[in-house]
Image (spheres, rainbow, N blue to C red):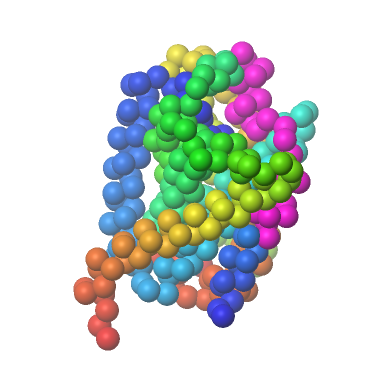
Amino acid sequence: MKNIYKVLLLALIVAAVLSPLASSSPDGLERVAEDLGFLEKGEGAPVIKSPVPDYVFPGIENEAAATAAAGVAGTLATFGAMYLLAKSVKRKNAGEIKGK
Amino acid sequence: MHIPDGFLDAKTWISTAALSAGALGYSIKKSREELDERQVPRLGIMAAFIFAAQMVNFPIAGGTSGHLLGAALATVLLGPWNACLIITTVLVVQCLGFQDGGITALGGNIFNMAVAGVLTAFLVFKILSAVLKGAAGRSVSIFLAAWASVFAASALATAELAFSGTVPFSVAFPAMAGWHALIGIGEGVITVVVVNFISRLGFADSKADAGAGVN
């Protein structure tokens, strides 16, 4: 439909195709934590359990496929969450702004 | 630079959570003044794109990687108030769904990336784009806004780690600043490319960033 949805499609392609190719090296903060010896402070059990820990979709053997599935699920979940939040933020003000 | 559980002490995560809650409330209030029906899907799509892009770690140097933050991307295209809500939404989904960033560090992560990252991107872009004219000037402004947003967020993260007694600031800052100065280059390049690409797909054809006083 609209062009902007091509960006959503692009996001899904990035999540499905590029995310399994991502570098698995530590990021800047992890690297510093490792080098300066405070990484273990963050290695206790997480305070809450996530359904898809570390972007590996449970129940999928192939690691690339599990990452791609996690990426697609997360991209859609993020779209949905943001859409609903934006919708609720917008709606409350619809009366004042809409002059039509 | 998503801080996990265990890096921040209670006084630090409680105070950053309080600051973030205040900033979010203000962002929602400001977004409400300018958000119209047409913008709603754009916010969703931008958040989805940033979530996806954040999964793609790129190698920088010495066995270290970085990934897009997206604060400047969202700020340039949709204004700072919407950008704050977008980056916050991404961080909440990552934390709750994917164990990326601890729940106790969520307020800190939101403060560093969605509040300070966005604010830095906004200020740098607003100032530079007023001085640097033309398409090249706009790209340079976007690049530097993106670089600065990453650098500012990493400096704040370092301050929170130090405030928590996890690592002394003077020890951690040179390391954090060095890596994030490099990651910021990746942030700048990706942000310029993506802004230019998706602007053509209708992301910048509206009064989208009018509220930001940019463009």
Stretch in magenta? A13-37
Please name the residue shown 47% across and 33% down the image.
A49
* Left or right: residue A88 compared with residue B3: left
Residue B96 in picture, x, y percent from top left: 45, 40
* Most foreground residue, B159 or A93: A93
* Most foreground residue, B108 or A6: A6
Q: Please, which residue is most extreme toward the bottom here?
A: A100
Location of residue B107 (image quadrant): top left
* Most foreground residue, A66 or A13: A66
Please name the residue shown 33% across and 47% down the image.
B24
Residue A63 visible in the displayed image:
yes
Please name the residue shown 29% across and 49% down the image.
B25
Q: Quadrant of the N terminus of chain B?
A: top right
In the figure, B10 relative to A64: above or below? Answer: above
Q: Please, which residue is most extreme toward the left here?
A: A96
In the figure, B90 relative to A23: above or below? Answer: below
Residue B51 in picture, x, y percent from top left: 56, 51
* Left or right: residue B173 compared with residue B28: right
Main SS class of the magenta portion in the image: helix
Please name the residue shown 37% across and 24% down the image.
B12
* Left or right: residue B9 compared with residue A70: left
Residue B111 in picture, x, y percent from top left: 41, 38
Residue B122 in picture, x, y percent from top left: 47, 53
In the figure, B50 relative to A5: above or below? Answer: above
Location of residue B100 (image quadrant): top right
Q: Is residue B108 magenta?
A: no
Q: Is residue A33 magenta?
A: yes
Residue B210 visible in the displayed image:
no
